[in-house]
Image (tube, rainbow, N blue to C red):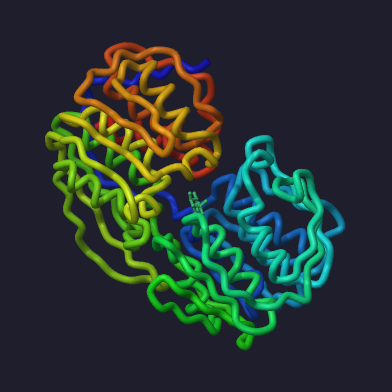
């Protein structure tokens, strides 16, 4: 048990950068490892999840060196990857697992893959079903629906696949499989999900075309190395922006944050709730839009979050739920059933944690309803070993009347290892 004792009345004030984007860091390692030539990645997220992807490629024979937040990958094309002599460990990382399954499906060798307890209970059939239709063979419990799994890749053929779930991981897995398949692989989305894979595949020279919600790729062009600058992770920035949004008299600037429209639904929500936000210094680097985000504290009101907005902020729902406890009126979040299969069942975890702290919140099948504004009392809660729940609790502790006691904060190193230090500098000013 850890006692958080950051006094509630201190305002947030400062000018800061957050670590590199987790989704983009994974993709840069994957594409750099299957491209020809040297790829340098700047501002790589040195968190546990992304290091799982690095370790996976080292086992497949790729030379990757790391100095602070810069990676250098010596790629020799995907056909130079070697059959690993030991099982590949994906840890807690759903992105590593699903994207690697797609890539491995197109390689003519056998692999055994596994993950930690949380990852072993998350569905893999959402990628394996279409990958099997493309020709991969897999063995695992529950008809290869969960890790651990054994795969035999190679001899894939392209398919057209209309995704039944809104998932960038599924889309990306199929596009990576398409690089190793004969013919065209076409993925059709219901709602647009984050498009970092498409952007980066273009930058590495793949033959990919995007037409609204339809994406086509084939294996006619091999990838060429290119340097990648990873923007700050908007999902990490969201925790600091939220702290400034709910603590009176706060003002915060976060520089060089990724503001890709398929990811930045959180900014739309802040604006709709009444926050004062300004995005300046906008530019595009390595195919991704970035900008500086400034927020000043202002009163918030409840909103409805549903439909195509949900995939654009799916990872931010834990912190949005906290914002909603501090907003006047009702906030309704629906169409977010995907939260049930994240690092933990996040609908259950959010409702459990926030109601223990004194919020008026109720779970629904596909989301939650929050009635604000309520003051939070403090109390004893669990992190569910989920980085985004843990960081949400830390931000909640900044406005709680009493101590917040949490079982464990170590999961924060999955996506934002320096979070507690950064927060300390902002509240300390
Ligand atoms: C991610 C996609 C999302 C997101 C996850 C990262 C990615 O998952 O929740 O944190 O990098 O592609 P789904 O594809 O399951 O929606």
Q: Residue at 39% across / 32% down in the picture?
A: 364
Q: How many marks are shown on the rendered structure?
A: 0
Percent across and percent down for residue 195 are 44, 66
Q: Residue at 78% across / 73% down in the picture?
A: 154
| In-front residue for pair 21/133 | 133
Percent across and percent down for residue 185 are 59, 77
Residue 63 visible to the viewer: no
Percent across and percent down for residue 281 are 22, 64
Percent across and percent down for residue 29 are 59, 64
The quadrant holding residue 37 is bottom right
Identity of the residue furthest to the right in this view: 85
Answer above or below: position of 98 versus 114.
Answer: below
| In-front residue for pair 281/306 | 306
| In-front residue for pair 36/146 | 146
In the image, 113: left or right of 223? right
Q: Quadrant of the C terminus?
A: top left
The quadrant holding residue 231 is bottom left
């Amino acid at each position: 048990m850890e006692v958080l004792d950051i006094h509630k009345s201190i305002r947030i004030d400062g000018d800061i950068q957050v670590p590199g984007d987790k989704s983009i860091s994974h993709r840069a390692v994957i594409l750099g490892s299957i491209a020809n030539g040297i790829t340098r990645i700047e501002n790589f997220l040195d968190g546990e999840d992304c290091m799982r992807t690095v370790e996976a490629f080292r086992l497949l024979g790729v030379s990757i060196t790391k100095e602070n937040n810069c990676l250098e990958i010596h790629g020799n094309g995907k056909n130079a990857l070697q059959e690993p002599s030991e099982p590949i460990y994906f840890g807690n990382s759903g992105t590593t697992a699903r994207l690697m399954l797609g890539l491995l499906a197109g390689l003519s060798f056998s692999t055994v893959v596994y993950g930690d307890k949380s990852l072993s209970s998350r569905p893999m059939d959402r990628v394996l079903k279409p990958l099997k239709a493309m020709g991969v063979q897999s063995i695992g419990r529950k008809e290869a629906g969960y890790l651990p799994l054994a795969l035999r890749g190679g001899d894939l053929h392209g398919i057209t696949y209309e995704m039944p779930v809104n998932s960038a991981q599924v889309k990306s897995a199929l596009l990576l499989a398409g690089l190793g398949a004969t013919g065209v692989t076409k993925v059709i989305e219901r709602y647009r999900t984050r498009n970092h894979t498409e952007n980066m595949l273009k930058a590495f020279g793949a033959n990919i075309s995007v037409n609204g919600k339809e994406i086509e790729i084939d294996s006619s062009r091999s990838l060429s190395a290119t340097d990648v600058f990873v923007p700050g992770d908007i999902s990490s920035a969201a925790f600091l922006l939220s702290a400034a949004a709910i603590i009176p008299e706060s003002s915060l600037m976060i520089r060089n944050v990724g503001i890709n429209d398929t990811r930045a639904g959180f900014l739309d929500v802040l604006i709709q709730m009444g926050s004062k936000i300004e995005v300046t210094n906008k530019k595009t680097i390595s195919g991704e839009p970035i900008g500086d985000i400034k927020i000043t504290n202002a009163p918030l009101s409840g909103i409805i979050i549903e439909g195509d907005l949900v995939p654009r902020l799916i990872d931010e729902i834990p912190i949005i739920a906290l914002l909603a406890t501090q907003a006047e009126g009702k906030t309704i979040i629906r169409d977010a059933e995907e939260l049930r299969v994240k690092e933990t069942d996040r609908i259950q975890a959010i409702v459990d944690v926030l109601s223990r702290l004194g919020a008026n919140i109720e779970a629904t099948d596909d989301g939650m309803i929050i009635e604000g504004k309520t003051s939070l009392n403090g109390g004893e809660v669990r992190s569910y070993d989920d980085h985004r729940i843990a960081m949400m609790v830390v931000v909640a502790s900044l406005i709680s009347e009493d101590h917040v006691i949490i079982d464990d904060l170590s999961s924060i190193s999955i996506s934002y290892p320096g979070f507690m230090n950064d927060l300390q500098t902002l509240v300390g000013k």
